[in-house]
Every structure is written in structure tokens, then in C-alpha cells.
Image: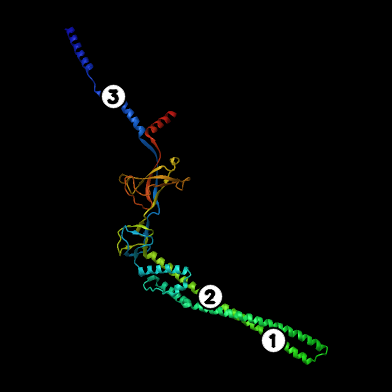
Amino acid sequence: MPAASTIQHQQLLSNEVQEIISYQPHWIIRKGNLLFFFVFVFILATTFFIQYPDIIRASGRLAAIDGPKHAIARTDGKIEQLLVSNEENVVEGQPLAFLQSNAKHNEVLLLNNWITSSEKIIAGDSLQQFINAPLPLFFSLGELQADYEQFRIQWKELRDALGNGYYQKKQQAVVVDLNLLQQQREGLLAQNSLLDSDFVLQQQEYKAKELLTSQKVLAPLELNQEKGKLLQKKQGLEQMNSQLLSNSINSHNKTKELLELDKYVFDLKIKFQSALFVLKANTQEWIKQFVITAPQSGQLYYTGFLQENQFVSSGTELFFVQPLSSNYYAELKAGQAGIGKLALDQKVLLYYDGYPSEEFGYLTGKLSYISPLPGRSDSFLVKVELPSGSLITNRGKQIYFRNNLHAKAEVITNNRRLIERFTGKLYEMIKR
């Protein structure tokens, strides 16, 4: 019995061993090493193609050359009239809205245009033409009415002096008088020369007869007669000198009269120009306060819901004008970490807080300037140019410019492959 049970047990073991030996494993077990090898080679090859760049992060803001500009209310008051609609194209200096005032806005604008054209006429030495032209009348200038009336007074005084050529005619008359006095003086000088020669001859004759009288050749009575003739000649000479002096005085008075005329007209011109400049300055100041004008040419946008009779406070931004073309750039502040890796023309990715990257994407730019020295905050100023010249993201979305729009930047300093990073780390570990 024991021998029979042993044989039976061996047969059972033999069947189990045979079953194990005859069992064929799954293919993944039979070829697992080979599969693992191929997977490893594939991952290794993938790391050769996958690029993982070195990134330096910085913060900054969006800026622009000839960027959008705001039109601001400079006084408290109601909007009396809106002159343009939203998204309308405007030109620089164009009125956009009127704020409430005692004056009529259109009348003040007409006055300002008239002042501008008048300055061109006056600058072209056409003052006579200006004062002969009729002066426009304005009666609804509000705060500017007093300045305008003062200007009208100075304009009237100047026109009375220069109008119809009165000043020129009077000046010409004085000049003619001066010429006549000069001719008279020349005649008097000629007469004086003759009288002087006659006096010298008479004086010589008197001395000769005086000598004869002393020699008792002539009687003293004849000498007295010659002395009387000499005195008459001297008296005529003195009278001629008196006439020459009178002529000089008259010439001096005429010259003085001419100078006084010139000074009077000059003073009138100075007062007139001063009144014109005061009126111009106050008119332009009034326009700055009560007329909102376009700061530049471009497309206009409302900054909020605006309507007539709406009250606005001083300093409120009412409009902004987007120019037809602008050059945008970003100002970044990079810290000390990794600053040595920055170089010109490196690629920069810009993400803006107001435009989430998950929805809008990012802007692409290039480094165009790196400050050689750090600033007060121990950071370096970096400028990023946007080559496209527009604010279109990589997803085709438009980013609208706002002053000091905050941005986060990623500067790609070295776009290395993934395998280079692994081997680089391994090399550093072995080197240690």
C-alpha cells in the first residue's frame, strides 16, 4: 500500500509540473523586456524633440508712442451739448462737447477764429488794412464781454489815429515843413556868408581910415561915419545869426513834433496789441474750460454713458481718442535673478491682467533695450518692442490700450531641448 500511494503521488506531481511546464504565458510577459526597451527609446527620442526653454519672469506696463489720449473736463458743470457720437472719427482741436457757461459757445469760437486770422494780418504788416476793415460785433461773450469791450476801445482809438491815412498825411506835412526849413537854412547860411565877407571888408576899410585919422589925414567925423557903417554891418550879421538860430529852433520843434506823433501812434499800437493779447489769452482759457476739444486726430470713444444736461466734475475723463496708427511697446522691470541671461532680440511673451491668457492669449515681442544699471528699486529697465505694431494676441483677440495697463512677462533666454536639461543635470552631478 505505501508503495502504491507513493506512485500515485508522484503521478499527481508529475501532472502538476507538466501543466506548469506546458502553460504558455501572455505575450506581454513573454516580450515585456523588448516592449520596455522600445518605450524607453521612444521617450528618449521624444525628449530630443521637446523643447523646454529657460524663462525669466518680469512685470511691467503697456506704453505707446502717439497712444490714445483722454479729453478731460476742466471745470464743474453740466454738459450743454454733445457734438460728436461714439466711435466717430475726429481731428485734433475739433470741439467735442460744450459745458454750461454764461456765454454762447459758438460766438466765442467765432471770436477765437477772428483773433487768429487778425494776428496773421497784423504779422504781415497790414495793420492799416486791419483797422480799415469793420470790427465784428459780439454781445453774448459772457465772462469775456468786458475784455472784448476794452479791446474795442483800443481798436477805435487806433483807427481814429490811423484811419483814412490821417496819421500818414500829418506825418508827411511835418516832413515837408522840415524840408522847407532845411532849404531856408541853406539860404540863410549863404546870406550869412555874404554878410560875413561884407563885414570883414568894412572892418578893413575902418582900420585903414582909422590909421589915416591918427595921421591927421582924415577928419574924425569921417571916421565916425565909417564906424557907424561897421556897426550896421555887424548888426546885420547878428540878425542873420538870430534868423539861423530861429530856423534851428523851428526845425527842432518839427522834429520833436514828428517824434511825438510816432510815439503817440506807437503807444496806441502797444495798447491795441496788449488788449488783443489779453483777449486772446482769456478766450483760449475760456475755451479750455468750457469747450472739450479733441487732443489728437483719430477715432473717438466715450468713457461712459454721456448725455446732455449731465453734471460732470472737474478732472472727469469724458472721451478718449484712439489714433489711426500707434507704436506700442512694453516697459518691464527685471530683477537681479538671471539678468545676465537677457540679450537683445530675445522673444518675450506678455500676459495682461485685464485680459486673462486662458481666453485672450498673449502678445509676442522682442527685447530692444536693457538698462546697464539698476534703478532705485534695484531692478533693471527693459523695453520690449511689439513687431506687429498692433495689440493682436496669438489667439487673434484684440487688446485695447489703456495707460499703464499692467503686464506680466516671460523672457525666453535659452530654448533648450528636454534631453539637454537631463544630461546637463547628470553632468553636473558627475562633476561634483
Q: Amino acid at mark 1?
A: Gln
Helix, strand or loop for disc 1: helix
Q: Which coloring applies here?
A: rainbow
Residue 309 found in image quarter: bottom left
Q: Is residue 128 visible?
A: yes
Place of residue 283 in the rendered image (x, y in percent of width and height, measured from the top left): 41, 68
Task: Characterize the local packing of mark 1: few (<14), some (14-19) or many (20 or more) Cα atoms within 10 angstroms.
Answer: few
Closest to the observer, 369 or 2: 369
Rendered image: mark on residue 32: 3
Upstream in sequence: badge 3 or badge 2? 3
Q: Amino acid at mark 3?
A: Gly
Query: Is 264 drawn above or below residue 27 in the view shown?
Result: below
Closest to the observer, 26 or 430: 26
Instruction: Name the residue located 29 percent from the left edge and 25 percent from the top edge.
Output: 35
Task: Characterize the local packing of mark 2: few (<14), some (14-19) or many (20 or more) Cα atoms within 10 angstroms.
Answer: some
* Lateral position of residue 36 relative to residue 6, left or right: right
* Lateral position of residue 41 relative to residue 249, left or right: left
Instruction: Name the residue located 49 percent from the left edge and 78 percent from the top edge.
Output: 166
Upstream in sequence: badge 1 or badge 3? 3
Instruction: Name the residue located 46 percent from the left edge and 69 percent from the top edge.
Output: 122
Q: Amino acid at mark 2?
A: Asp
Quarter containing the N terminus: top left
Residue 184 found in image quarter: bottom right
Place of residue 338 in the rendered image (x, y in percent of width and height, measured from the top left): 43, 40
* Lateral position of residue 6 relative to residue 382, left or right: left
Place of residue 348 in the rendered image (x, y in percent of width and height, measured from the top left): 39, 43
Marks 3/2: CA distance?
116 Å
Residues at badges 3 and 2 in contact (C-beta under 8 Å)?
no
The residue that disc 2 covers is 262
